[in-house]
């Protein structure tokens, strides 16, 4: 069970999330402002943070920046701001996921489970030579991808895209994040990325129109689904 910090100024929402998570046997800390949240974060060892953007004393984006200065702890944004630009900014700054209010209990719990699994898998990644996700196998050592035991012939850039997504399975990655991982830190290859993604889906998906592995987050980027 995880220790989770909720940074949320709305008492009703904070108490609701706290009750749901305590029922799942998690340990909960609740903070109602940016200052209290950062103080609690520095005082306690936490496994995941649920962070509201609309805090009374400081924007949640600034809180996210301060957390990322010292820690890779999973951070899920919980916000009423549903504009794509808000989501892209938070994800580019290191948020692991973004949930728009209002949201249901099943969605909240599913996102938390995915973020916690991703954190555990990420800690082991340096030792891993293969990433297995359903029938997909990404062989990091040999730079190959297979599905159901059959090798899929990919271009070097297509392989890099698959590896980046697989290393962050379950996590939304923005167009900018993927582009910079594949083509370099100053690149902006959104259109090239879309072309590559279309080709990748034709090669790995049974039905590219209804993908099982790589989901498009419209206006934001892509997510590799956990199988």
Image (tube, rainbow, N blue to C red):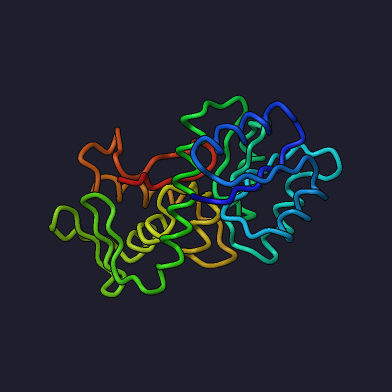
Q: Residue furthest right?
A: 57
Q: Nearer the viewer, residue 83 or 67?
A: 67
Q: Nearer the viewer, residue 7 or 161?
A: 7
Q: Residue 132's x, y, as percent?
A: 27, 58
- The percent coordinates of residue 57 (x first, y second) are 86, 43
Residue 124's quadrant in the figure? bottom left
Instruction: Name the residue: 13% across, 58% down.
Output: 149
Total marks drawn?
Answer: 0
Q: Residue at x 57, y 66 (%)?
A: 185
Residue 182 vs residue 20, the one in the foreground: 20
Q: In the figure, is residue 65 to the left or right of 25?
A: right
Residue drawn at x 15%, y 53% is 148
Residue 167 occupies which quadrant of the picture? Answer: bottom left
Q: Position of residue 125 (x, y in %)?
A: 40, 68
Q: In the image, what residue occupies the spot 68% across and 66% down? A: 70
- Quadrant placement of the C terminus: top left
Examine the image and state in which quarter residue 138 appears: bottom left
Is residue 221 left or right of 160 when viewed as pictured? right
Q: Residue 25 appears at what percent x and percent y?
A: 51, 42
């Amino acid at each position: 069970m995880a220790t989770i910090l909720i940074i949320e100024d709305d008492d009703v929402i904070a108490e609701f999330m706290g009750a749901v998570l305590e029922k799942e046997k998690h340990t909960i800390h609740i903070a109602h402002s940016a200052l209290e949240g950062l103080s609690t974060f520095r005082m306690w060892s936490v496994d995941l943070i649920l962070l509201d953007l609309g805090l009374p004393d400081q924007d949640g984006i600034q809180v996210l920046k301060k957390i990322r200065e010292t820690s890779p702890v999973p951070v899920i944004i919980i916000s009423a701001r549903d504009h794509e630009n808000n989501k892209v900014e938070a994800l580019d700054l290191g948020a692991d996921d973004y949930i728009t209010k209002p949201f249901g209990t099943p969605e909240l719990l599913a996102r938390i489970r995915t973020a916690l699994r991703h954190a555990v898998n990420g800690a082991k990644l340096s030792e891993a030579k293969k990433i297995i996700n359903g029938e997909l196998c990404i062989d990091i050592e040999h730079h190959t991808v297979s599905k159901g035991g059959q090798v899929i012939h990919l271009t070097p850039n297509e392989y890099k895209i698959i590896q980046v997504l697989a290393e962050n399975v379950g996590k939304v990655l923005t167009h900018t994040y993927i582009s910079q991982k594949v083509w370099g830190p100053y690149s902006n290859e959104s259109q090239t990325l879309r072309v590559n993604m279309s080709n990748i889906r034709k090669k790995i998906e049974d039905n590219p129109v209804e993908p099982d592995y790589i989901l498009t987050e419209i206006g934001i980027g892509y997510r590799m689904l956990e199988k």
